Amino acid sequence: MKADKAQFQDRSLSPWRKVLLLLAGYAFATVFLLSVTLVYVAYRESQKLDKAHLERAVRLNPLEAEYRAKLGQWTLFAENNAGEAARSFESATRLNPYEARYWLALATARLQLADTTGEFEAVRNAAAAAPTTPEIAWEAGIHLMVGGHEREALHTFRTLLGSAPGECDRVVALCWRALHDRQRILNEVLPREQSAYLTFLRLLANTGAYDDADEVWKATVDLGQPIPKQSALMYIDDLLRRENVPSAASAWRSLLSLDPALRRYRQDENLVMNSRFEEPLLDDGFDWRFPAPGGAVEFSLDSNEARAGSASLLLTFRGDVVGDTGLYQAIVVHPETEYSFRATVKSSELVSATPLRFEFRDAYSGELAATTGEFVGTTGDWITVTGRFRTAPKSRLLKLGVGHAAASHVAGKMWIDSVELKPLDANAAGR
């Protein structure tokens, strides 16, 4: 045992073995340092964006895909040499097939070479490498759309919206410009979510594609999902501006049916929405509307004064000149139909040269259809105002508001509650 141990120690201490081990260590260190140096030098060369330095970076580190991609970019855009650029991008994709940028760059080069088959293959690889990265999917979708591969482009955009719904605006805008096909965008691009549908609806309304917008609204309602009031009311306002009263009324009914909170705005057969002022004033749609604060009249809900419900509408006049107060509600009516009106009113120190009154005017011509009531002074308690009128042959939409015969200075307060408008013919449909 001792002899074997001594023999092993003699071998381990052999001078030749020490020299060999030392030389091997020096060789390994030299190769390692050389490799590190080459990598570093190649990196430094790649930062100098000209062809000579980029080519040197590729020679020094031929396994780095990024250097080949940079060289391809230089060749493509600085020299307009799509063939050489494509070869550089092909090398980059072989070294790193998981980098979508390289595939898109290769697709661009092949597009310039009129290699449609190669371009399509490169774009598909890019989309597969990063299907949910917004910028990659966006560029891939554009390539596919321009190349005539509509189905693949729409699929790419749909995948993008599944992970990045914030891209919906530009995706919808591009697809509409490219296709002008409402049904394909609904079926192949948009997720079945009301926010995406409403984005499409706004685009169509803003570009004047009103028939398509109306169909997208119907599709939005069919989703059965609650619709944000702001978006729906903007659409209803657009319909009213276009004098499409039936569609506006239908959209309002759909909005009420999908939003339980809004259902309380309508009561029985009364055509006046929020007639007892118990709900927040929307200042939009078919609810009460009023001017912005700071005018001659201030509008507010008053829970301390109410005739039937929990609040009333208070109009505070500052003593300025008032013609039309600016308060109104749009009401859908039928032509040549008898209607009855009823409201309760209270006033305090109301001073005006001509009494205030309820007015019904045509929403589009402004023609006065009917008036009722005269309010001035102090009523003390609530008083009931009634009226009856027949709509004109072409009447479709009336504005119920408060005004008087001639503009004059008005001061004091006026409360309104329990406003009611009903057709005398029970078969006359409301909105």
Image: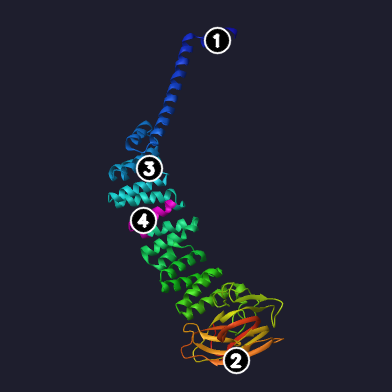
Q: Which residues are magenta?
A: 135-150
Between 119 and 9, the residue placed more toward the observer is 119
Q: CA distance from mark 1 to mark 3?
A: 55 Å
The residue at 46%/60% (across/down) is 168
Location of the N terminus (image quadrant) = top right
For the residues carrying marks 2 and 3, which lies nearer the camera in this image? 2
Specify which label sits upstream in the sequence, 2 or 3.
3
Q: CA distance from mark 4 to mark 3?
A: 19 Å
Q: CA distance from mark 2 to mark 3?
A: 81 Å
Left or right: where 102 falls relative to 419: left
Query: The disc labelled 4 sits on which kind of residue?
Result: Leu
Q: Residues within 10 Å of mark 2 (few under 14, many from 20)?
A: some
Residue carrying label 4:
144
Q: Residues within 10 Å of mark 3 (few under 14, many from 20)?
A: many
Specify which label sits upstream in the sequence, 2 or 4.
4
For the residues carrying marks 1 and 4, which lies nearer the camera in this image? 4
Residue carrying label 1:
9
Residue carrying label 2:
387
Quadrant hosting residue 150 = bottom left
Q: Is residue 193 visible?
A: no
From this view, report whether residue 89 is shown above or below residue 36.
below
Q: Residues within 10 Å of mark 4 (few under 14, many from 20)?
A: many
Specify which label sits upstream in the sequence, 1 or 3.
1
